[in-house]
Image: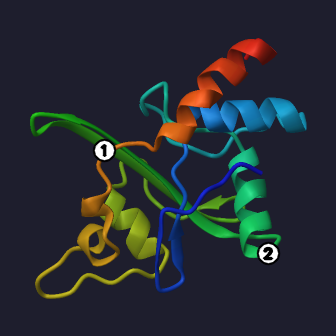
Amino acid sequence: MGLRAVFTHGDITVFPIDHYFSAYWAARRGNSALLDLPDGLTGLFPNEAVLRDLAGEATGTESPRFAIVGTDYFAGVGGQWAAAFDGEERLTPDEASINQALAALGVRATASQDEFDVIGLGGFRSSPDHLDAYVGLCDELGV
């Protein structure tokens, strides 16, 4: 299925993905459905419902709890986007932060760390190289 875990914290496992990854798997599986995402997200935010399918396969559940998070920062300036789901139901408001999405999955901040830092996302700065292949794979499929 192409998912590669980079780390786990408790019952949260982080699988790096990007728009090309989700677009490729949606095309390969013939799933054109989209997730219930708010308006105004960056055009490269993964929105394909195939991600719910992949999360279900990874967790062995029909209605997986998962979040999709994204950041775009350069020299400390940029933005973040996030949405958490319980199956098809979006759990987060339209302009959710990453911390809100993680809290919806049960991650709890401490007195000294927010949800982002509690699970160790601060150590994850860039997408892994294996995702680069999905750009070409999408081109091959005409996606």
What is the basis of the colouring in this image? rainbow
As helix, strand or loop, the secondary structure at mark 2 comes to loop
Residue at numbered disc 2: 61
In depth, the one of 8 and 40 nearer the eye is 8
User: Could you tell me the amino acid type at mark 1?
Assistant: Gln
Left or right of 37, for residue 75: left
Residue 83: x and y, percent?
48, 54
SS under mark 1? strand
Q: Position of residue 102 (x, y in %)?
A: 41, 69
Q: Are marks 1 and 2 in contact (CB under 8 Å)?
A: no
Is 44 left, or right, of 47 in this rendering? left
**In front here: 109 or 130?**
130
Residue 101 visible to the viewer: yes
Residue 18 visible from this viewpoint: no
Q: Amino acid at mark 2?
A: Thr
Circle 1 sits on which residue?
80
Residue 73 is situated, as x and y percent measured from the top left of the image, at 22, 36
Q: Earlier in the sequence, mark 1 or mark 2?
A: 2
Quadrant housing residue 143: top right
Which class describes the residues within 10 Å of circle 2: few (<14), some (14-19), or many (20+)?
few
